[in-house]
């Protein structure tokens, strides 16, 4: 205890310094915490932003009828299996006439992505009239060329240590000089599913997988959570059973998420034989996890509705059920929705339980329903973080940026609801 | 009105919870749950074959009217176990393996009704011992590798002791004096099997008295040659070869054991050790000079052809020249193709859907 | 509009006693789901764990010093010897959680104190939600950040200073996990500190104490119980965290307390043992459930204690 009787100026000064020092420690603690947040955002954005542009190469493609559809029948089945690669090799050969040697030609073809072949196939299937015409097209470049154009290839490295050799760099530079190679907005990243080729992979499959999972999660957790909250708040008498329920809910909120995954694995998959790797099971697991959050938020919101409202309704002759559903619940709805959205945001970012139920696989097709196999956004991030190809590092970071934007949107929506709709009593 | 809506919603949700359990009860009570028509091929198995299979699956999905097969990486052993667990849509159609199926696995399959299995060989892969480019390249013999990793190593003529080697120089003064730290795959992985059989056993056989043991006491020989030390020098890194590559970059003193394709994909950051003086390169593995190379396979349930759409077509895609041929797209991914004559042999076998016979 | 609603109400009010009873029972059933989930968790974990303990004695599991679960999967294969001692995993988990708490506790507490006692309402209004962003970031993102950014930095500075740092150190995982926990601690202790009655503060000021003296000698001692509760809750969170350790900690089950070495945790082993493998007949896969049961009991225990403490604290100042 400081000796207050001897309040000399020296003592005051020391106490003042202590005061200032303490404030600064607090400020520094906050600065460090926010600094980490900033560092994380910067580290990820720096790596990820380049995905939003994709390198394309301009070529004159001749859709040779003799090659694609010699019969001239334009049978869709035939157009599907036709080999589109020769169209590209011919075009490239015409562009780089000096390349003659066989091995070198093969290297030349590799400056284009395999996606260029698929792109031509899709074009022809959509519009068979292209056959027989010549078109000037922008086609996706390979991942290596893309990385080079984005300045992510260390050209000072010895040639044998680079996947992109001097020859290729030379060709790319030639194209660059004539404006036949450029970066365009990467629509594919937002409109396609996963791929083994970094330059062809997109996040739509994962986004839809997440959306389906959240849909299932919401349909189960919201009504269940809401009704539980209403019951506990407005109807339940304090009994051993309701005590037990309350303790349970509080404890469930602290159960590690991976344990819910194990529950899903052994009960939903093991006992019920629900289809593995699907948003149905993923959503169910997430629902169990989100339930406590929703219940707790909904109860808090119901509690904040003043009793005068209930008493007024009861006084006018409404029954207890009517009072709750006609008056209390609608008034508490903004708060309940806010809590639900935050719970859903948590579910959107959850990874570990989904690993347990097999939502971690290579899936190209965009899922069409809740029983199609799918991944989710965070699982896709986990998968890409593990892929050997260089190009996936930037994709992982970009996928994180997309995930974070969804989370920010959900949080903003929650804040908006709280600010605009919630009543202050 | 509100109450009716809320109640309807809750009924819906209850339906969602109860509905599936009702289904499950049906499934439990009677016939096994037959997900009658799965419309996509289900593939499991080796993490080494995974990068190749996913590329083929993707190409197959994009250039045919079939759905893209679903590929999960479970390790060769894990995959074969799932594959052999039974017939029907619940179990995978195809499993990848980075080693040949074992007799015990064929028996297990047969017990569960999986009698006709079609074997497809897709090419070769080398197993490399790689480290970061930040450190010098290592030159080892198989004998060194065995002495670095075995649980027990020979002492003198015929004696054994718990592996005392802590640094590479402890084994062989020519090797650098850095701590031995090797990350490699767990027993579910075919890479582990192949590594143990080729590298460890190869090194083991350089000790004459152990080699002699092979004839007299096979079990003891195997226990000695196949057992990897568990004192933390060898780190089981899971079925994730790519993670190993990242870890190598972070720790230049560590080595990793994985397939050549991963080395090939990351050639700018990691390098493969010379084994018995031979560099792990595309050419030296293809011509058989590199001592640690194995064949890659996948196995198909014949009974499922015609059940799951597209299996036969998928096999055709895999074995086609544009995929696993000399200049196919799999070679770009680091798969070492078979010689043309051998490739043609396999094409014939697959066209005839010849099932595997126990030899 | 209004008359018809009234009519409806009256009509509903008359003949629907039964309907209301049904609604109430329906809600009761819904609230039972929470119990059902807990029972489901306990049963599923206990059942598989029971199968596991038939293969491996409970004693060996709880007190075994070695963890080497990668047993042979075929008769003709030689795998690891199959040791299922949970202690190395527990050590790793405790080590990483300890590091995380060592990072998060001072940062979180000081932030909370500053925000409640010093910050202007305006500053507080934007700093608090910004800090809480840290809690909203998915753990897979932290994992990526830890593996790609933090681990190499730690290794490089460590080797530069002459330490032998493993490529995947407990330090990297723990540090990043600590960042994740800051907002938990800061907002929980924020509530606790704010709950200390104003009268106590004013009494302290009245006696001539400065703010820092009031905080350290009056407010914090009064809030200690609640803060301990919130730290326990955060610890329970750290123990159960999965993705950060899966991506940034290792698989090496070592009995070590050296933060520069690679360690493994219970959650990492659950993921490793169960991804891909779906067979429930080997000690290896069943072990995952035994670990999970252990983890569940541990976190549940911490949580119950923490909630009890916080409740008591609330009563104290109610």
Image (spheres, coloured by chain):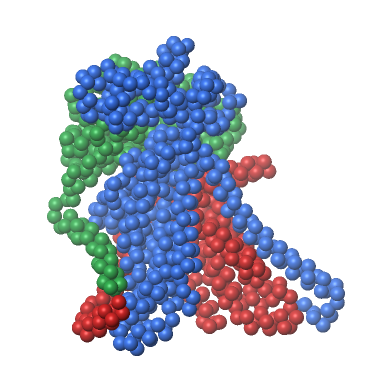
Q: Is residue A265 left or right of residue B266?
A: left
Residue A335 placement: quadrant: bottom left
Residue C294 seen in render:
no
Q: Position of residue A410 (x, y in %)?
A: 45, 58
The image shows residue C302, relative to residue C25, as above or below, that is: above
Foreground residue among B119 and A380: A380
The image shows residue A275, relative to residue A260, as above or below, that is: above
Q: Position of residue A398 (x, y in %)?
A: 48, 43
The image shows residue C93, relative to residue A5, as above or below, that is: above
Q: Is residue C72 left or right of residue B311?
A: right
The number of callouts visible is: 0
Give the quadrant of the N terminus of chain A.
Answer: bottom right
Foreground residue among B343 and C73: B343
The residue that appears at 51% across and 51% down in the rendered structure is C142
Instruction: Identify the colour of chain C in the image.
Output: red
Q: Is residue B112 left or right of residue B183?
A: left
Instruction: Identify the colour of chain A in the image.
Output: blue
Instruction: Identify the colour of chain B in the image.
Output: green
Foreground residue among B305 and C271: B305
């Amino acid at each position: 205890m400081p000796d207050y009787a001897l309040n000399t100026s020296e003592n005051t000064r020391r106490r003042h310094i202590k005061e200032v020092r303490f404030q600064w420690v607090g400020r520094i603690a906050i600065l460090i915490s926010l600094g980490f947040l900033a560092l994380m955002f910067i580290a990820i954005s720096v790596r990820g932003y380049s995905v939003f542009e994709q390198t394309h190469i301009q070529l004159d493609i001749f859709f040779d009828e003799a090659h694609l559809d010699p019969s001239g029948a334009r049978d869709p089945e035939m157009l599907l299996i036709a080999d589109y690669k020769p169209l590209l090799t011919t075009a490239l050969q015409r562009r780089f006439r000096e390349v003659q040697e066989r091995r070198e030609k093969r290297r030349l073809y590799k400056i284009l992505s395999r996606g260029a072949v698929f792109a031509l196939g899709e074009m022809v299937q959509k519009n068979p009239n292209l056959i027989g015409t010549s078109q000037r097209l922008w086609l996706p470049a390979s991942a290596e060329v893309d990385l080079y154009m984005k300045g992510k290839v260390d050209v000072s490295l010895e040639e044998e240590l680079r996947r992109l050799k001097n020859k290729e760099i030379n060709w790319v530079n030639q194209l660059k000089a004539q404006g036949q190679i450029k970066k365009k907005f990467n629509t594919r990243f937002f409109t396609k599913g996963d791929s083994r080729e970094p330059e062809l992979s997109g996040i739509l499959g994962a986004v839809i997988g997440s959306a389906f999972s959240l849909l299932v999660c919401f349909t189960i957790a919201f009504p269940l959570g809401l009704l539980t909250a209403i019951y506990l708040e407005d109807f339940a008498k304090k009994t051993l059973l309701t005590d037990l329920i309350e303790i349970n809910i509080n404890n469930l909120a602290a159960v590690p998420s991976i344990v819910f995954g194990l529950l899903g694995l052994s009960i939903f998959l093991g006992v019920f034989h629900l289809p593995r790797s699907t948003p149905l099971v993923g959503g169910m697991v997430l629902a169990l996890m989100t339930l406590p959050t929703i219940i707790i938020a909904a109860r808090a919101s119901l509690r904040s509705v003043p009793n005068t409202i209930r008493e007024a309704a009861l006084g006018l002759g409404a029954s207890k059920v009517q009072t709750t559903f006609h008056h209390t619940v609608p008034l508490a709805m903004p708060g309940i929705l806010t809590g639900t959205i935050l719970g859903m945001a948590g579910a959107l970012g959850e990874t570990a339980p989904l690993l347990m139920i097999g939502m971690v696989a290579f899936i190209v097709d965009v899922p069409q329903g809740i029983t199609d196999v799918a991944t989710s956004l965070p699982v896709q991030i986990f998968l890409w973080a593990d892929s050997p190809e260089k190009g996936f590092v930037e994709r992982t970071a970009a996928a994180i940026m997309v995930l974070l934007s969804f989370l920010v949107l959900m949080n903003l929506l929650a804040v908006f609801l709280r600010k605009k709709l919630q009543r202050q009593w | 009105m509100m109450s009716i809506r809320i109640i309807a919603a809750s009924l819906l949700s209850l339906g969602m919870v109860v509905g599936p359990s009702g289904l499950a009860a049906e499934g439990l009570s009677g016939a096994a749950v037959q997900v009658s028509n799965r419309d996509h091929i289900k593939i499991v198995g080796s993490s080494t074959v995974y990068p190749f299979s996913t590329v083929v699956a993707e190409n197959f999905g994009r250039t045919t009217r079939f759905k893209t097969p679903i590929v999960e990486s479970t390790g060769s052993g894990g995959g074969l176990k799932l594959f052999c667990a039974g017939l029907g849509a619940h179990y995978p159609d195809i499993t990848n393996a980075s080693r040949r199926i074992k007799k015990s696995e064929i028996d297990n399959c047969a017990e569960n009704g999986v009698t006709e299995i079609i074997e497809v060989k897709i090419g070769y892969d080398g197993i490399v011992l790689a480290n970061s480019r930040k450190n010098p390249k290592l030159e080892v013999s198989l004998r060194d590798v065995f002495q670095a990793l075995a649980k027990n190593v020979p002492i003198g003529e015929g004696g054994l002791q718990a592996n005392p080697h802590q640094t590479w120089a402890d084994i062989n003064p020519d090797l650098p004096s850095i701590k031995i730290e090797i990350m490699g795959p767990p027993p579910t992985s075919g890479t582990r099997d192949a590594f143990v059989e080729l590298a460890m056993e190869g090194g083991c056989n350089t000790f004459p008295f152990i080699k002699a043991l092979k004839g007299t006491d096979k079990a003891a020989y195997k226990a000695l040659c196949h057992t990897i030390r568990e004192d933390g020098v060898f780190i089981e890194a899971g079925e994730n070869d790519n993670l190993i590559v990242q870890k190598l970059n972070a720790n230049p003193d560590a080595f990793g054991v994985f397939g050549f394709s991963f080395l090939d994909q990351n050639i700018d950051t990691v390098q493969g050790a010379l084994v018995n003086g031979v560099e792990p390169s595309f050419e030296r593995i293809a011509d058989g000079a590199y001592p640690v190379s194995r064949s890659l396979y996948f196995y198909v349930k014949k009974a499922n052809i015609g059940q799951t759409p597209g299996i036969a077509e998928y096999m055709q895609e895999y074995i086609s020249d544009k995929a696993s041929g000399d200049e196919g797209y799999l070679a770009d991914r680091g798969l070492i193709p078979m010689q043309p004559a051998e490739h043609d042999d396999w094409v014939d076998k697959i066209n005839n859907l010849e099932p595997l016979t126990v030899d | 509009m209004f008359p018809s609603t009234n009519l409806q109400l009256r009509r509903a009010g008359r003949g629907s006693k039964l309907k209301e009873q049904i609604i109430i029972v329906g809600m009761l059933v819904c609230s039972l789901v929470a119990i059902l989930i807990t029972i489901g968790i306990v049963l599923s974990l206990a059942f598989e764990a029971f199968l596991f303990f038939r293969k491996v004695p409970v004693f060996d599991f709880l007190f075994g010093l070695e963890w080497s679960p990668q047993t042979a999967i075929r008769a003709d294969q030689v795998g690891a010897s199959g040791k299922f001692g949970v202690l190395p995993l527990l050590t790793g988990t405790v080590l990483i959680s300890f590091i995380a708490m060592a990072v998060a506790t001072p940062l979180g507490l000081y932030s909370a104190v500053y925000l409640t006692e010093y910050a202007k309402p305006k500053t507080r209004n934007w700093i608090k939600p910004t800090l809480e962003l840290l809690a909203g970031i998915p753990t897979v993102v932290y994992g990526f950040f830890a593996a790609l950014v933090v681990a190499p930095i730690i290794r490089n500075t460590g080797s530069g200073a002459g330490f032998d740092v493993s490529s995947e150190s407990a330090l990297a995982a723990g540090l990043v996990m600590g960042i994740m926990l800051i907002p938990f601690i800061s907002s929980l202790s924020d509530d606790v500190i704010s709950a200390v009655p104003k009268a106590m503060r004013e009494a302290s000021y009245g006696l001539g104490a400065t703010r820092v003296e009031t905080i350290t000698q009056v407010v914090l001692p009064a809030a200690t119980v609640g803060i301990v509760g919130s730290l326990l809750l955060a610890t329970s969170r750290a123990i159960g965290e999965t993705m950060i350790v899966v991506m940034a900690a290792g698989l090496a089950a070592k009995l070590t307390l050296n933060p520069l070495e690679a360690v493994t945790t219970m959650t990492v082993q659950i993921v490793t043992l169960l991804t891909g493998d779906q067979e429930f007949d080997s000690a290896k896969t069943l072990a995952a459930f035994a670990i999970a049961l252990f983890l569940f009991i541990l976190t549940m225990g911490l949580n119950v204690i923490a909630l009890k403490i916080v409740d008591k604290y609330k009563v104290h100042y109610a």
